[in-house]
Image (cartoon, rainbow, N blue to C red):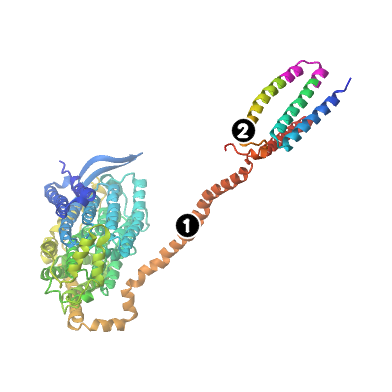
Amino acid sequence: MSMHLWIIPLLPLAGAAVNGLLGKRFPRALVNAIALGFTAAPFAMALWVAAQFAGLSPDQIPHIERYATWLSAGAFSAEYGMYLDQLSVIMMLVVTGVGFLIHVYSVGYMEHEGGYYRYFAYLNIFMFFMLTLVLANNYLLMFVGWEGVGLASYLLIGFWFLKKSAADAGKKAFITNRVGDFGFLIALFLLIKHFGTLQYDSLWPLISRYPVETGAAGLLTAIGLLMLVGATGKSAQIPLYVWLPDAMEGPTPVSALIHAATMVTAGVYMVARSHLVFNRAPDAQMAVAVIGTLTAIFAASIGIVQTDIKKVLAYSTISQLGYMFMACGVLDYVGGIFHLMTHAFFKALLFLAAGSVIHGLGGEQDMRHMGGLRKYLPYTFWSMTIATFAIAGLPPFAGFFSKDRILWSAWSSGYHVLWLVGVITAGMTSFYMFRLWFLTFFGKYRGPNPETVAHGHDADAQHAGHTGAVQDAKDAHAAAGSHGHRSPHESPWVMVVPLMILALLSLVGGWAGVPHSLHGSDRFGTFLSPAFNEASATPGAAAATPAEAKPESEDNSTELAFSSISVGLAALGFLAAWWLYYKRPELPERMAKAAGGLYTLLLDKYKIDELYGAVIIQPLILLSTNVFWKGIDQGLIDRAVDGSATDAREASDAMRHMQSGNIRSYAGWVAVGAAAVIAFMVWRGVR
Amino acid sequence: MVPLSYYLVLSAILFACGVAGFLIKRNIITIFLSIELMLNGVNLSFVAFAAQLNKLEGHIFVFFVMVVAAAEAAVGLAIIIAVFRTRETLNVDRVNLLKL
């Protein structure tokens, strides 16, 4: 039975094609209808597929559909086909569902912007590539989606390409991702070299024959580490996370899409998809866990001092992705994907709510100019509240269940240090999120007085300045101008409704995975874990799998105690934020002064960008300028090409003088020539 | 009997005079005559060798050269007249362009 899975990714592509090629002449309503229609349809179809999937018997999973041989070279061939198991079902639902909500929201958010059709075409193409990535039945097709989301993110981050910082941020994202892609590509080459295929269904049995590489690192460790390099690029982990904070230059719904539904989750998905490799490579798996944990606390510490509302959220994403990697690293892939899902809900909500705040303030992003917005933006406030509680890990919101599951996995698999760092990070997360919450919605409004504000305000000018980019410059300027004069206002319904839906999901999304210790049934885990069960992934090779049967009779009270520790820390973070940013708002400044260098270091994001600039980028630029540009390109290639032309010209110039037009000189040449011939003949004759 | 070398030396002198006139003179007609002089210097060599070696080919060659020289004179003089008509000069140094 075929479910025609190929239709799901192709629908957004069709939408992108129509909007991208013809949208310039369409009225906005039509652009909206196309963009939303071609994302609602794959969501509906994903729901239908999920329903069908639920009816499959276990031996029909994974459900693989093959459509055609995509390319074949010698013994190697790759198919165009789709692979549906529990993992891709969940990813597909998250991508289409959250993606669709972000599309709806964008209709309101981008109302005043130029290049409307272009924006929606890019969004749709983003969905297409992400769906290709999660549904592909081989690594090569996955790589197409992998590169494609990189392209789409480049286009969207640099959407306001007239602004240099936005164009630079787009380039930075793309180039940083290229570094990671390189690692992933080498991993794929290794797979081809040693296994001769990239098809999941033929790869899994081959890999499962390998023993666990304890002690000596081997092939699978190398593959795993290279895959990790790829994942750090796409999922913004140390050391390749630097592109994500800059990606805030894009429109806010784009940030939501990148952070929640597409792009950054790709790395986690890829690690989870390659679980057979990581299961057999303890070193690579350890690296995943350590990098994830380090990233989690590192990004959280930067997030504490950021003042740009979107930057705080960006660092929180990096930090939360760190948790997902930590989960994958301690072999709790279910926890990783669970957190991926709940994170998709509350991070999309956070970004969209932040976007609603920014929209309501006419482009203001600095939290120091916000405050007291609770009164002006009630719906945004309530949805943001739910999201903040969810990300802080307070029960019964979604983040609590997933984050706690990860922390418990870290502890119970013996990584006590990782658990400790994770718990501290949870407290920090709670602190900086509530800091954002208090700064934005409580206290007095610190923005410019609505009566006196003029076009000249930075953020306003920026907001309007973006627009001239493509079209309707005059129109948009007028719109943004009128915008700036108003006091903070609630967003239109088309933006608020997605917020409400996501708020609901952030509230109940975690209930799917209530752990046994809380007398839940962990339906999420029960559903997803077969995908990570080695026997089911490799039909026919079950004998080789030492099943990782977790003892279900876990010490519930210990788990509960650990939960209460992390909840307690989260509550502590809340109280600290309340004390510093609500009760005594003058304190943080004094503390910042007291902390001095440490504060500046955090504010400068540990100067990592500067470090990369000095260690990698500057030497590269110097090398490129002096050796490749001036040395090889100008000195060697240009000189060879230009030099041969110059030589030919000079030689011709000399020869030209023989053609004087003077008959007697010609006669002279004839005589000289004749004399030379005679001399030659005489010489020959004498010899 | 006059030895062969006498003829050859005379022939060489005639040819050298022709070459010198050809290179030095500026008047087209003089140059033309210098060419005739060279041709006849060569003709002298031919007949001298023919007589010395008792062969007929040298004589025949001389006739051919004379015929060609006559034809050349006819064509050459026609060209000279055409050049004079357009340029109003017979100085070769001033006839240095293919077109006017």
Residue identified by numbered label 1: A629
- Residue A172 spot, x, y in % from top left: 34, 61
Mark 2: secondary structure: helix
| Front in this rendered view, residue A458 or A614 | A458
Q: Is residue A626 left or right of residue A205?
A: right
Inspect the image, locate mark 1, and give the three-letter code of the amino acid beneath it: Trp
Q: Residues within 10 Å of mark 1 (few under 14, many from 20)?
A: some
The image shows residue A662, relative to residue A401, as above or below, that is above
Residue B97's spot in the image, x, y percent? 60, 38
Asked if residue A71 is among those painted magenta in the image, a careful observer would answer no
Q: Magenta residues?
A: B48-63
Marks 2/1: CA–CA distance:
64 Å
For residue A471, which numbered disc appears in the image?
A: none
Observer able to see residue A368: yes
Name the subunit of mark 2. B
Q: Chain of mark 1?
A: A
Residue A101 versus residue A274: which sits nearer the camera? A101
